[in-house]
Amino acid sequence: MTVPTSLPDVNFSDWGDIRYLHLGTEWVQGSMRLDEPFEIHLEYVQRMMAWLLFVDPATAARRHAMQLGLGAGSLTKFCHRKLRMKTTAIELNPQVVAACRLWFKLPRDDSRLSVVLGDAGEVASHAHWRGQVDALQVDLYDHEAAAPVLDSEAFYADCRRLLTDDGVMAVNLFGRSSSYERSLSRIQDAFGAGSVWAFRPTREGNTIVLALRTPFEPARGELARRAEVVRERWGLPAHKWLRVLKPVE
């Protein structure tokens, strides 16, 4: 894997007790509360944990989470430290990895954590992790944050092949409504009918889309039960998710 020479510089800013990651612009690529470094600060990033509603939360520690795009390391840290999962993060920019370890409390690799310097598209298309990922969290934006860097139907089909039979992909879609509709259509084409759920956009304009490797719709009562478990065990506002998460027709 050859790292491009034109990658943006990485820097951070502090505002009160919040630290923000930037890629050479004012756009926020991730954040962390300085006194709660292993919690998830941003609402849209919390929603990328909603895959927990589609599995038995008690099985989380036996599962494998993968992040395509490290950001400020919030998802990677949470899956590794809080859920005790096997966790793999793929990041193209070595400066982002260094920044996460210097400024955002990302732990060193261990028997459960592996941060891989690589291209997310190449990783998704490779057979190495095919059928091994239970929670695939995709957040791939460049320094201008205009649209996802990888957003083709072929890419989403590769993501589907990474998943276990009951695996779930969570994707952050940010941008104009036309960009969102185009991305959503590609995800639906790659995953098939009955497989896709979407949140309402956050105030900042982030829409989290979930795509199931095997389509099914849990009973609302079971979703409510799992949401309460997630709220009690890990402090995520899962009980609120059910009001703004719907299957896509």
Image (tube, rainbow, N blue to C red):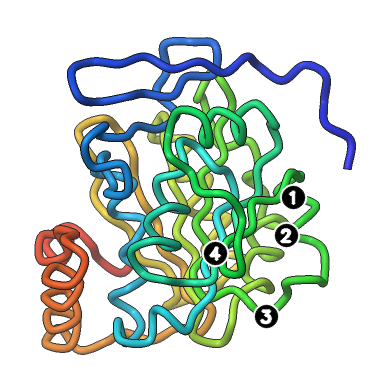
Residue bearing the label numbered 4 = 87
Give the labeled residue for mark 1: 121
Query: In which image quadrant can residue 99 be found?
Result: top right
Tag shown at residue 124: 2
Image quadrant occupied by the C terminus: bottom left
Q: Residues within 10 Å of mark 2 (few under 14, many from 20)?
A: many
Q: Mark 3: which amino acid?
A: Gly
Q: Amino acid at mark 4?
A: Thr
Give the residue drawn at x 31%, y 65%: 50
Q: Nearer the viewer, mark 2 or mark 4?
A: 4
Estimate the x, y position of residue 120 in percent, counting from the top left.
70, 49
Q: Nearer the viewer, mark 3 or mark 4?
A: 4
Looking at the image, which is closer to me, 212 or 234? 234
List the residue tagged with mark 3: 131
Residue 235 rendering spot, x and y as whole percentages: 16, 61
Q: Residues within 10 Å of mark 4 (few under 14, many from 20)?
A: many
User: Are the two marked residues, 1 and 2, in contact with CB atoms closer than 8 angstroms?
Assistant: yes
Precedes in sequence: disc 4 or disc 1: 4
- The amino acid type of the residue labelled 2 equals Ala
- Front residue of this view, candidates 131 and 203: 131
Q: Quadrant of residue 213?
A: bottom right
Q: Residue at x 57, y 40 (%)?
A: 140
Q: Is 144 situated above or below 241?
A: above
Does any portion of residue 249 appear in the rendered image? no
How far apart, in angstroms, are the residues tagged by discs 4 and 1? 18 Å
